[in-house]
Image (cartoon, rainbow, N blue to C red):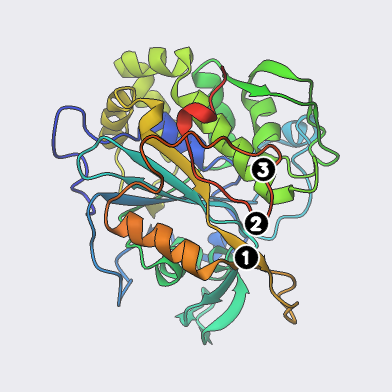
């Protein structure tokens, strides 16, 4: 439930400041439409007909594809230019168990078919319910409509919302002295110009941005990018730099402020909240964390003015959302499932965090 997730046992909730900030790593909070929204946006106050509260706490983590928070030199150096659509570029549901002993992360691909709820647009016009890609919800109505859309599609009540921009992502990674990632194969992306050979690499903030944004490496496209984002998160959670930053009160508070950024969006977190979460995070073993992507059944027929969209596997996705609502794990505790690399469209798996970590 909102504003109650810090209460409970000494171990607290298993998602900390760095985890929250680095998870929404693929986008910027200031998209084209965001600039047209009111000066202060309360994400939750105007939401009605919402799903019922369930056990644990659910957080929607999201970034958009805006590019106006980094300098021209950084855009050129890290190949982060191009024309933004003001859409969400990464969207993940994070579930924190009621007992504070388990973390579940489920990615929602940006090209997923969605029906955007009826709403008042930023310019005051009324829009009826209509088909779109899920990433269009943010472009049309900002954080509140994104939350409303996800709730209507999943039946999961969102308690908190967090987004982070390119600037905050780069600065947060640098604040923990970088993050290590591992790859069993060469990674070469034609758009971001990422170049990594097989093995272990310690990435600074800018190179980390290239890593988590890359989607032109192979046929897995966005599914591959989602998997790399999840790998990046797992290694950020267990990095020595993260532990050192969270152990220093001043550094921890500074890191939390960096990730929260502007106070124009009420995301349900304070600096104190994030610092407390971050310090509790490292008590959770990676074997008690799980990561997956909503099951995909294939592509829908092309929709005029929308394009090609992904069709969720109705039965399998409903099962995962039901488990999240019931505060149950998405995969058995003893699961030894290994992630496919690269992932395949119809073979999505849920794996424990230790399967994504550098060995």
Callout 3: 10 Å neighbours few (<14), some, many (20+)? many
**Distance from the alpha carbon under mark 1 to that under mark 3:** 19 Å
**Left or right of 275 in this view: 150:** right
Q: How many labels does the image show?
A: 3
Apparent side of residue 143 relative to residue 184 in the rendered image (left or right): left
Residue 225 rendering spot, x and y as whole percentages: 67, 43
Quadrant of the snapshot with the C terminus: top right
Q: In the depicted view, which residue is nearer to us: 145 or 29?
A: 145
Left or right of 202 on screen, residue 81: right
The mark nearer the N terminus, 1 or 3, is 3
- The residue that label 3 is drawn on is 225
Q: Do the CB atoms of the residues marked 2 and 1 lie less than 8 Å apart?
A: yes
In the orientation shown, which residue stands out farthest toward the right? 190
Tell me where residue 335 appears, x and y as whole percent: 44, 37
Q: What element carries label 1?
A: strand
Q: Is residue 220 above or below residue 186?
A: below
Residue 112 position by quadrant: bottom right
The circle on residue 346 is: 2
The residue depicted at 20 percent of the width and 40 percent of the height is: 99
Judge the density around disc 2: few (<14), some (14-19), many (≥20) Cα neighbours within 10 Å.
few
Report the residue marked by disc 1.
297
Between residue 68 and residue 251, name the one nearer to us: 251
Name the residue located 48 percent from the left edge and 62 percent from the top edge.
317
């Amino acid at each position: 439930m909102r504003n109650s997730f810090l209460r409970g046992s000494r171990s607290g909730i298993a998602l900390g400041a760095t985890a929250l900030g680095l998870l929404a790593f693929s986008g910027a909070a200031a998209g084209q439409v965001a600039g047209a929204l009111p000066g202060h946006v309360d994400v939750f106050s105007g939401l009605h007909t919402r799903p019922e509260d369930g056990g644990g706490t659910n957080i929607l983590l999201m970034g958009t594809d805006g590019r106006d928070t980094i300098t021209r030199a950084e855009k050129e150096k890290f190949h982060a230019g191009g024309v933004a659509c003001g859409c969400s570029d990464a969207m993940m549901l994070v579930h924190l168990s009621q007992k504070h002993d388990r973390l579940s992360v489920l990615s929602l691909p940006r090209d997923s078919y969605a029906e955007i709820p009826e709403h008042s647009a930023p310019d005051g016009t009324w829009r009826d319910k209509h088909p779109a890609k899920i990433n269009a919800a943010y472009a049309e109505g900002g954080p509140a409509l994104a939350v409303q859309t996800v709730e209507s599609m999943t039946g999961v009540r969102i308690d908190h919302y967090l987004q982070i921009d390119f600037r905050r992502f780069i600065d947060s990674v640098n604040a923990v002295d970088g993050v290590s990632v591992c790859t069993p194969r060469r990674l070469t992306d034609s758009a971001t110009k990422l170049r990594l050979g097989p093995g272990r690499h310690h990435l600074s903030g800018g190179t980390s941005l290239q890593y988590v944004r890359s989607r032109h490496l192979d046929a897995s496209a966005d599914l591959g990018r989602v998997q790399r984002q999840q790998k990046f998160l797992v290694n950020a959670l267990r990095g020595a730099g993260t532990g050192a930053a969270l152990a220093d009160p001043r550094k921890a508070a500074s890191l939390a402020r960096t990730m929260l950024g502007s106070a124009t969006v009420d995301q349900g977190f304070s600096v104190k909240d994030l610092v407390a979460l971050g310090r509790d995070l490292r008590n959770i073993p990676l074997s008690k964390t799980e990561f997956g992507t909503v099951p995909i059944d294939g592509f829908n027929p092309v929709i005029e003015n929308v394009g090609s969209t992904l069709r969720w596997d109705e039965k399998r996705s409903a099962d995962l959302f039901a488990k999240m609502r019931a505060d149950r794990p998405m995969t058995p505790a003893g699961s030894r499932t290994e992630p496919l690399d690269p992932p395949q469209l119809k073979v999505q798996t849920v794996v424990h965090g230790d399967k994504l970590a550098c060995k």
